[in-house]
Image (spheres, rainbow, N blue to C red):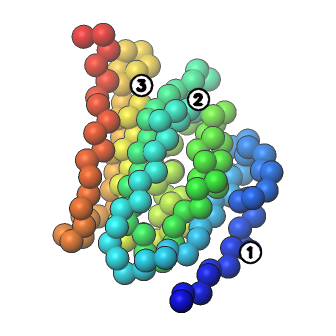
Amino acid sequence: MTETPSYEHLTLLGKHSAQPTNPHAAVLERVVNPAVGKHYIVRLTCPEFTSLCPLTGQPDFAHIMIDYIPNNWLVESKSFKLLMGSYRNHGAFHEACTMEIAGKLISLLDPVWLRIGAYWYPRGGIPIDVFWQSSVPPSDTWVPAQDVPSYRGRG
């Protein structure tokens, strides 16, 4: 029988948690990976991500998909949800939001591998998609396609 991990260090799960007003105020938490040493993919999808243009204050919308192979840690999902919501009133360009989210997860989790695909909806008629991965994924890992279609408009 395996020992149940302690979750006493979590400050958000199971408690009322106000939405952070910006990403710098958000607390991202982690839990122990129950399968250390196995290369499996964890997928986090945020199909209704919003932030603000830092110059105009107009809303920007994206479908963000993150895949990672955990090392010792998994991101705690409620804290991740609150982090993503904290961008709602945050002004930053698409690339800055995307890379900041990736950087926060890399710093917290030190995963074996991580990739982020940020599929931004058009502003001024031009969609901007941002992609990044930390390295080449291990050869023994099945990495599913993200399959988020490119923006096609009405055509």
Residue 65 occupies quadrant: top left
Q: CA distance from mark 1 to mark 2?
A: 35 Å
* Residue 85, horizontal then vertical, whole percent: 63, 41
Q: Could you tell me which residue is drawn at 58 percent across and 56 percent down?
A: 77
Q: Residues within 10 Å of mark 1 (few under 14, many from 20)?
A: few
Disc with the residue nearer the chain's start (1 vs 3): 1
Residue 54 in view in this figure: no
The amino acid type found where label 2 is placed reads: Leu
* Residue 97, horizontal then vertical, whole percent: 51, 42
Q: Could you tell me which residue is drawn at 40 percent across and 21 percent down?
A: 122
Image side of residue 38 versus residue 94, left or right: left
| Contact flag, marks 1 and 2 (Cβ < 8 Å) | no
Q: Quadrant of the C terminus?
A: top left
The amino acid type found where label 1 is placed reads: Glu
Which SS class for mark 3?
A: loop
Q: Is residue 43 above or below residue 65?
A: below
Which SS class for mark 2?
A: strand
**Residue at the spot of label 3:** 121
* Residue 25, horizontal then vertical, whole percent: 72, 51
Q: Residues within 10 Å of mark 3 (few under 14, many from 20)?
A: some
Q: Could you tell me which residue is drawn at 63 percent across and 64 percent down?
A: 29
**Residue at the spot of label 1:** 8
Disc with the residue nearer the chain's start (1 vs 2): 1
Which SS class for mark 1?
A: loop
